[in-house]
Each structure stands twice: as C-alpha cells, then as structure tokens.
Amino acid sequence: MLHDTYNRIHDYLRISLTDNCNFRCTYCMPDESISLIPQKKLMQADEIFSIAEIFTTLGVKKIRLTGGEPLVRKDFAAIIQRLSTLPVQLTITTNGVLLDRYKEVLQKAGIQSVNISLDTLDPVKFLQITQRDQFQKVWDNILMCMDHGIYVKLNIVLIKGFNDDEVLDFIRLTKSLPVHLRFIEFMPFDKNEWNKDKVVHNQLVLESVAQQYELFKLRDDKNDTAKKFGIFGHAGTVSFISTLSDSFCGTCNRMRITADGKMKNCLFGAEEFDLLGAFRKGENIIPIIERCLLKKHKMLGGQFDDYTHVDPDKLQNRSMIKIGG
C-alpha cells in the first residue's frame, strides 16, 4: 500500500496519454498555438503498461486514462487493450467526439463507464468554449454509449456568466436518461483566465436544484470527490464536486502521471517527480513513487487554502492539459 505522511492510502492512478487535444476549451487549453510535448518525450505504449503494472503491485486498484484527449493517440486501442489485462478498474475521461471510433475497443477492454466533458447544451456556446463545431457529434456519442450499456458521467465545469444558467437544463436530462451529472467548480491553472468571481459555489447550486426537485442523498464512498444525489422520479443522478469551496483533500487517494512521465501527487501541486526518465535508465522507480507521496501536502498542493484569496499568477503549476486532469 502507498501512504503519504497523513496516512492517506493511494490506490487510484490517473495517467495522461497526451497533452494534445482536438478541442481548445478556454479553461484548459486556451492557446491555439500551444506547444506540444515532443513525441520522443511522451511515454510510449509499452512504457505506460510497464509503469502502470508497477503501480498495481503497490496496491493501485483503479486507473483512469486522461489527456489532453486520450483518444487522439494513434495507439490508444493498443494501450487500453493491454492495460485491460491488469487487475484494476479501468476507465477514461474524454471529450466524447471520437468515441464512436472506439466503441468495440472499449467494450473488449471491459470499460463500463466513461467521463465525458460537456459544459453546455447550447451548440452556440459549445462552439464558443471548445472552438469546435462538434456538439451534435458529442451528443450522439453520449447516447451511443448509453445504448451500449456504458455508464456515462458528464463533467460540467460551471463558470459564472457563461453556463451557470444551464444547471436546470442539465437536470432535466436525468428525467429520462440514466446519466450522472457532475457539476465541477472552476479551478485555477496556468493561463486559463481564472478568477474567483467566475467560481460558482456548488452549495448554492445544490440549494437551487433542491428548490425545484426532490433530491435524496446517495452513499458516497470514502474517497469520492463528488457528493451524490438521486432525484425522485428520474432515471439519472447528480453530484457536486466542490474542489475549492469544500475540498476533499482529507481522503485523497489520487496520483497522477503526466504524458511525459512526471508523477504529481496533487492536481494543484508544483512538485513533479521524473518516473519516465528513471525508468528509461533502468532504475527502480518505486522509491521515486514513495518519495513523491511523502512530499504530498495536506491540502491543495500546499499552494492555497482559501480560493477567495488566490492570486492565479503566483500559482506554480502547469496548465490543465499539461497535467492531465
């Protein structure tokens, strides 16, 4: 088992396959001309598998593939098929636009759920935030997943003045669709134009939904980041991820590996540990993994504890797309 100095057990690994994406969401990858990691510095398919396998020997039970957009990797099918042989729960986070190409691959790999980022139900707003006219394709793929028994979680980053007026529109989807909504607070990263006034406090969202619908609490697992609710008479469910206003750091079990093989012990952490460099030299990476976790801060990467006083220009971190979500 992997522990940090606060006795938190870490058994969930998020692996970024690429820092490339076919969308340009303003809170993640705002610069159209952003420089990408050179191919030779990316983890290769066999390296991803071998490093992941080492983590499973250390007690990792769940692996999530992220990006960028993980499905843009030409060897995505080979990567996920091989990882599916490990004794872990395997899942992905995607923008959804390429899911139809990989339907059979995902089914063969035993993928039972996917997280799909969808911040608006308005095609015009979708184009505005992603800079891509692909709303209908994403929506069709969401329905395709549900039709084939893949559980869909929609990740919705709420930004005040942009999509906070769509909360009830999303809730209405759950009436007939067995979709799980995840409302996520807008978080600060490098050059994503964050400021505290754009944050939509999730407690207020919950209260506004509860005024319109009869909610009932669902059980949250120990390491859940989301507070989950059912809605009487609805096929779907809803949850709230309050990273900033009510952090869940006390039960964090997450580790991250960037596409260039750096290990991060926190989404907001500045420290990175070079697993890939050591692995390519034939070194034992387990001591590096353990050292990384021993450096983990109590909360929010040690960079802030109150988002209302955060100066985003002083945060030391990569952009979201360079981290891997």
Image (cartoon, rainbow, N blue to C red):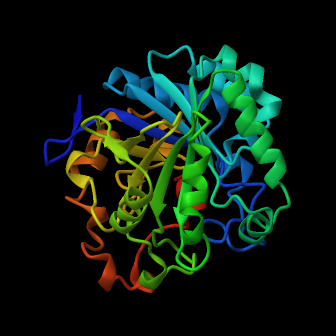
Residue in view at x 45 percent, y 68 percent:
187
Residue 149 placement: quadrant: top right
In the rendered image, the vertical position of residue 189 relative to residue 237, given as above or below = below
In the rendered image, the vertical position of residue 308 relative to residue 221, given as above or below = below
In the rendered image, the vertical position of residue 14 relative to residue 322, given as above or below = above
Residue in view at x 71 percent, y 69 percent:
129
Residue in view at x 58 percent, y 46 percent:
154
Locate residue 4, reporting x and y percent.
20, 45
**Left or right of 325 in this view: 271:** left
In the rendered image, the vertical position of residue 317 relative to residue 114, given as above or below = below
**Left or right of 174 in this view: 59:** left
Question: How many dots with numbers?
Answer: 0
Residue reaching furthest right? 133
**Left or right of 62 in this view: 81:** right
Q: Is residue 108 visible?
A: yes
Residue 309 placement: quadrant: bottom left
Locate residue 253, reporting x and y percent.
30, 41
Q: Is residue 322 visible?
A: no
Locate residue 63, reporting x and y percent.
47, 32
Locate residue 258, reporting x and y percent.
53, 50
Viewer-proximal residue, 309 or 318? 309
* Image quadrant occupied by the N terminus: top left
Viewer-proximal residue, 126 or 298? 126
Residue in view at x 46 percent, y 23 percent:
89
Residue 204 placement: quadrant: bottom left
